[in-house]
Amino acid sequence: MSFNVTGLTDYTNQQSTELVVKSLFGSKTAAVLQAAGQVQVGVKSAEALNILTSDVFFQADGCGYNASGNTTFSQRDITVGKIKVEETLCPKTLEAKWMQTQIAPGSPEAVPFEEQIGNEKASRIAKLLEVSMWQGDTATSNTNPNTNRFDGFNKIIDAASASTIDGNTTSATAITTSNVEGLIDDIYNALPADVADADDLVIFAGIDTFKKYTTALRDSNLFHYAVEMEGMEIMIPGTNVKLIGVGGLSGTDRMFGARLSNFFVGTDLANEEEEYRFWYSQDNDEVRFRATMKYGVQIAFPDQLVQFTLA
């Protein structure tokens, strides 16, 4: 005879995948890109974004064959950082506190409020990943462990600045409620003609810049436009461009305009190495927590991206 537990699932296994997803895609930037299908999974170290471009030349139609134009394959790599979060939780520490009522009788082998702790961890990890997606920098001079695991969009775009389009056409030295509308209009006007009619054009800005813009918009009394805001997203009046406020750009005074399909996030996710669990360590008589993940970002076409940086 033996235990028949085929109808039961462990708490950790049941919630593990859900909490990993909350961590990886709980931030604003990641959620927007996930919804747009801009997530490349199965990336364990580095993986190429395979890019195809071609040019076409019209010719007079007549006899003969005169080949012209090229079809070009190129690549830009998504390099992910390997990240883990670990914590030791001793249930006995809580026995003299009000949490004792939530601890199982006897020698405890689990912590109370495990699901709530897991959700809190997922939320915190998501916030840190949001900042890293934009401000991540693997340079040895960056000693912040929360932002030095992979390179973010800011660094990647800066490295391609010879190809990107300058959006600070007035050499602005500050973003204020007085000039923010004009600065965002400048970014919109700088978008290249090849993508100007795309249906997924966005401008990413920090939440602080987004709030300045919506304040200025309100004060402008643009009653002849139907202005609707949902979360930290708003259609820029009179355009086909959506302004999106993201925490990862807050405090940077930077903005980026491009097609949403130009931004990619890479992760493993499909592999069991990306896990999120609590377990009881009998050797140490304590509950342990671990979350592991792989994460990175990349852009596909630097020449189709407008970046705004203060002069």
Image: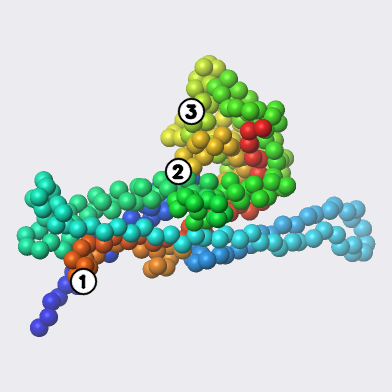
Left or right of 223, for residue 97: left
Q: Which residue matches tag 3?
A: 211
- Disc 2, SS: helix
The residue type indicated by label 2 comes to: Lys
Q: Residue at x 54, y 37 (%)?
A: 252
Q: Residue at x 10, y 83 (%)?
A: 1
Q: Helix, strand or loop at disc 1?
A: loop
> In the image, residue 241 lies at what x, y percent?
59, 35
The residue pinned by badge 1 equals 283
Residue 38 visible somewhere in the drawing: no
Label at residue 87 = none
CA–CA distance between discs 3 and 2? 15 Å
As drawn, the residue found furthest toward the bottom would be 1
Q: In front: 68, or 27?
A: 27
Residue under label 2, please give it. 28
Total tally of numbered discs in the picture: 3
Question: Cα distance, mark 1 to mark 2?
Answer: 40 Å
**Vertical placement of 241 versus 85: above or below?**
above
Q: Between disc 3 and disc 1, whose residue precedes?
A: 3
Which residue does the image show at 61% across and 61% down from the upper left?
A: 77
- Is residue 281 visible in the rendered structure shown here? yes
